Amino acid sequence: MELVSVIPIKIQMTKIAILLVLVAILSPRGAESRKQRVLNSVPNSLEYTAISCRAHTASITDFGGVGDGKTSNTKAFQDAVNKLSQYKSDGGAQLYVPAGKWLTGSFSLTSHFTLYLHKDAVLLASQDINEFPALKPLPSYGRGRDAAGGRYTSLIFGTNLTDVVVTGDNGTIDGQGAFWWQQFHRGKLKYTRPYLIEFMYSNDIQISNLTLLNSPTWNVHPVYSSNILVQGLTIIAPVTSPNTDGINPDSCTNVRIEDCYIVSGDDCVAVKSGWDEYGISFGMPTKQLVIRRLTCISPYSATIALGSEMSGGIEDVRAEDITAINTESGIRIKTARGRGGYVKDIYVKGMKMHTMKWVFLMSGNYKAHPDNHYDPNALPVIEGINYRDIVADNVNVAGRLEGIDGDPFKGICISNVTIGMAAKSKKVKWTCSDIEGITSGVSPPPCDLLPDQGPEKIKACDFPTQSLPIDTVELKTCTYRLHYM
């Protein structure tokens, strides 16, 4: 293996194909572009945008990796990360995964590190449970989701890290989830299934330009972390696969999710912050979250779900330019007695939906609890919910908004919404209970608990104009020359 210091290079754009083989290095060059691309002008070069560029690089083949789809590369990946971690304080390091099928179990990343997948690279998750060590339950959950015990370590994992990039030229991570789904349905799991990508207690994380397939359960799970960029992901799982949520920010601050396409067996994006008494005690909210240009297909779940595990609180969520097709609901708030916490200051505008069961869905009776020790008097606060500029067609029910008796959901604002009902839609277009709010310019007319304020209030529902800190993050253009060795 050869690790070379970075040298600047000049590049002219032309159109020739490139085969990326082994990486030794050239250095970052400045410029602003979010479009990731392989440079066609200089053979064996690549360029992509990232929060940080690296001074050192190596290939997984330098550590004995074999891309035949059969040989386990778990040790090769972990050895590579461990070796490259020596450069954390010397410009950081990149691990390049060339074309091939790379079978691996769980491995953990390090700080100031980039994992880069070639467009024809496929990480295949091992189906050997022994390659996924068990972890303790998350402290804000108190137990696992699939079983009372802990959870299997995620395929790509990191904890207490800073400045990590997982990216590629639309390379693939295949969770081979059918094996895990069968174990789940048979009740054979001792621990909760592994996620594809998870970072805990970390900051300055980028996950971008990848295809994620067939996750055992949730695909992307940043938890107890901050300053997270999730961009340009294609996430696909069978629509009947169990709990294959797309992207789940959990007790995180300053997160940006954009330009993602998700086909899922569960919520495309699920915003979380802990479960009942454990989440209340841990007390870490998810806040300052931006979701843009999301396309979702999920016939049995939500485009964006807030909860149900929201006991640490959820606030200041901004979603815009969202498309949902053949999906159960648009934005869903789900909570229950015993959750505590809050969902407040939610802003949604510019949604387009086609073939939906519900457009608006709020559920105050979501029954799942981690155990019997929750406090039924711990009531959630739901307030400041703003929806505007929404168009939907072929809809079964316009809205089902159900708060909690004695704990109404307040401050709901819905404006400039046109919903075309399906030919065989329900006779009752809206059902509402234990809610308070206003509407303007909504068709079909909503329930009496959401009185129309007239056309002059068509812009009544707020959407903040001031940017969040995550929107000020500037990406760098990283340029490398790749050498045969």
Image (cartoon, grey):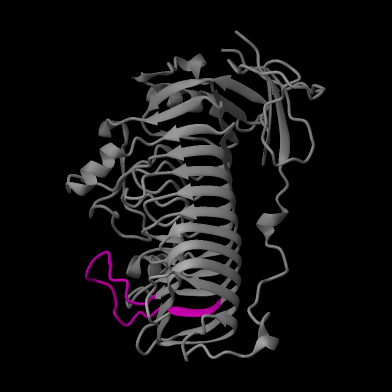
In this rendering, does residue 88 appear at all? yes
Q: Position of residue 368 (x, y in %)?
A: 28, 67
Left or right: where does residue 380 sit relative to residue 143? right
Q: Position of residue 473 (x, y in %)?
A: 70, 50
In the picture, residue 434 is in which quadrant? Answer: bottom left
Q: Position of residue 91 (x, y in %)?
A: 67, 31
Q: Residue at x 48, y 32 (%)?
A: 172
Left or right: where does residue 85 sit relative to residue 469? left
Q: Which is more toward the observer, 277 or 45? A: 45
Q: Which is more toward the observer, 63 or 19? A: 19
Left or right: where does residue 37 sit relative to residue 401? right
> Hey, which residue is sitting farthest top in the picture?
485
Q: Main secondary structure of the magenta part?
A: loop
Q: Is residue 112 magenta?
A: no
Q: Which is more toward the observer, 110 or 145? A: 145
Q: Which residues are magenta?
A: 363-385
Q: Residue at x 79, y 35 (%)?
A: 30
Q: Is residue 368 magenta?
A: yes
Quadrant showing the N terminus: top right
Left or right: where does residue 303 sit relative to residue 253? left
Q: Which is more toward the observer, 297 or 428? A: 428
All told, the count of numbered labels is 0
Above or below, 231 relative to 365: above
Q: Residue at x 34, y 35 (%)?
A: 176
Q: Position of residue 372 (x, y in %)?
A: 22, 70
Quadrant showing the C terminus: top right
In this rendering, does residue 225 appear at all? no
